[in-house]
Amino acid sequence: MPTARIFQRPKNAMQSGKYRTESWQLEFEPSEPKRPDPLTGWAGSGDTRDQVRLFFPTLVAAIAYCEREGFDHTVVPAPEKTLKLQSYADNFR
């Protein structure tokens, strides 16, 4: 039975906006390890579920999908959002 991981995407560190941070993402855990291709050296495996990413508007919808399809699932909690409050003058101390 495939195992799925459900999590919220973190905010992109390169941008100040919060685009796509409210949705929940479902990814499948790999069922076999990746191995290098003898010709090209690229890593790959026969597991095609590694390419699948599903997005859901809420955590409840993602869990309901897993239960309906019979997938084991693990919910990874979102990291705590902390604000680092400092003034511009603190950069020159």
Image (spheres, rainbow, N blue to C red):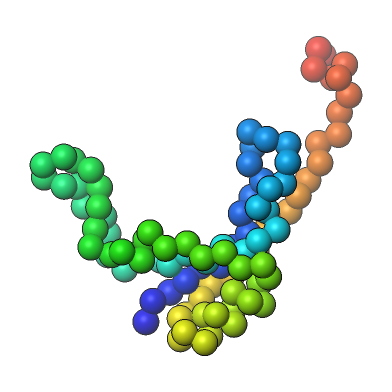
Left or right, residue 81 beside residue 10: right
Name the residue nearer the viewer: 69 or 92: 69
User: Looking at this rendering, what residue extends furthest in the left direction?
Assistant: 39
Residue at position x 25%, y 47% in the image: 43
Residue at position x 72%, y 46% in the image: 18
Left or right, residue 78 beside residue 44: right
Tell me where residue 34 appears, x and y as whole percent: 26, 55
Residue at position x 45%, y 81% in the image: 71
Report the label total.
0
Seen in the picture, residue 91 relative to 17 is either above or below; the reply is above
Residue at position x 68%, y 53% in the image: 21
Seen in the picture, residue 53 relative to 12 is either above or below; the reply is below
Q: Quadrant of the N terminus?
A: bottom left
One can see residue 74 in this view: yes
Seen in the picture, residue 44 relative to 23 is either above or below; the reply is above
Quarter of the view holding residue 58: bottom right
